[in-house]
């Protein structure tokens, strides 16, 4: 084998091993793995299943809130959420019909919300302002109008 082939073979093998080690370190040591303990829900009965029978914003601690949210074509319930600055907010979400997206512009929040599953994601809002929330999964004819805002005061 050509000497340079050997060098590239070793380099590329080292890179693959390096990526595996890095991904493993992130997943297990830093807890950045994909969500586990997935909760399921009957998508036909979202309106009757707690907590989604009562969507809204709930205070759960000093600076902690939970937003129980349903996504459906082509809206988010509740709409126009208001929370105080510095709050840690956990969004508990499910879809009543098709797969939707939940992306908060200007943050790292970007989740897929699928019918039949409960999606949870937590974000701390330190900066006051209006945060745009958009659906980033194509969900039908009104996909482009599916948005809401989170107001941080
Ligand atoms: Cu909901 Cu796109």
Image (cartoon, helix red, strand yellow):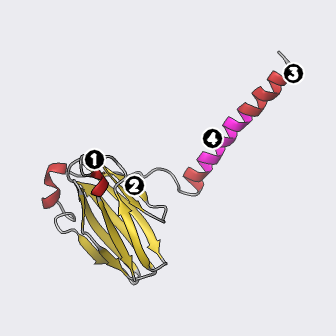
Q: Looking at the image, which residue is at 81% across and 23% down?
A: 6
- Which residue extends farthest top? 1
Q: Upstream in the sequence, badge 2 or badge 4?
A: 4
Q: Upstream in the sequence, badge 1 or badge 4?
A: 4
| Mark nearer the viewer, 4 or 3 | 3
Local SS, label 4: helix
| Separation of marks 1 and 4 at Cα, in angstroms | 34 Å
Indicate left or right for 124 with 66 as reference: right
> Which x, y percent locates residue 103?
40, 59
Local SS, label 3: helix
The residue that mark 3 highlights is 3
The residue that mark 4 highlights is 20
> Which x, y percent locates residue 120?
36, 60
- Looking at the image, which is closer to me, 110 or 42? 110
Is ligand 1 closer than 8 angstroms to the Cβ of mark 1? Answer: yes
Magenta segment boundaries in residue numbering:
13-25
- Looking at the image, which is closer to me, 20 or 141? 141
The residue that mark 1 highlights is 139
The residue that mark 2 highlights is 111
Q: Looking at the image, which residue is at 14% across and 50% down?
A: 44
Contact, CB < 8 Å: mark 4 with mark 3? no
């Amino acid at each position: 084998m050509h000497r340079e082939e050997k060098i590239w073979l070793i380099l590329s093998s080292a890179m693959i091993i390096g990526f595996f080690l890095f991904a493993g370190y992130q997943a297990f040591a830093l807890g950045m793995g994909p969500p586990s303990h997935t909760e399921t829900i009957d998508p036909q009965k979202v309106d009757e299943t707690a907590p989604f029978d009562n969507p809204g914003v709930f205070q759960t601690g000093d600076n902690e809130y939970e937003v129980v949210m349903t996504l459906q074509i082509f809206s988010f319930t509740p709409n126009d959420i208001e929370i105080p600055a510095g709050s840690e907010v956990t969004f508990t979400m499910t879809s009543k019909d098709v797969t939707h997206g939940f992306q908060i512009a200007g943050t790292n929040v970007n989740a897929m919300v699928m019918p039949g599953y409960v999606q949870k994601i937590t974000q701390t809002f330190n900066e006051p302002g209006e945060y745009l929330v958009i659906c980033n999964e194509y969900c039908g004819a009104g996909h482009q109008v599916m948005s809401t805002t989170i107001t941080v005061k």
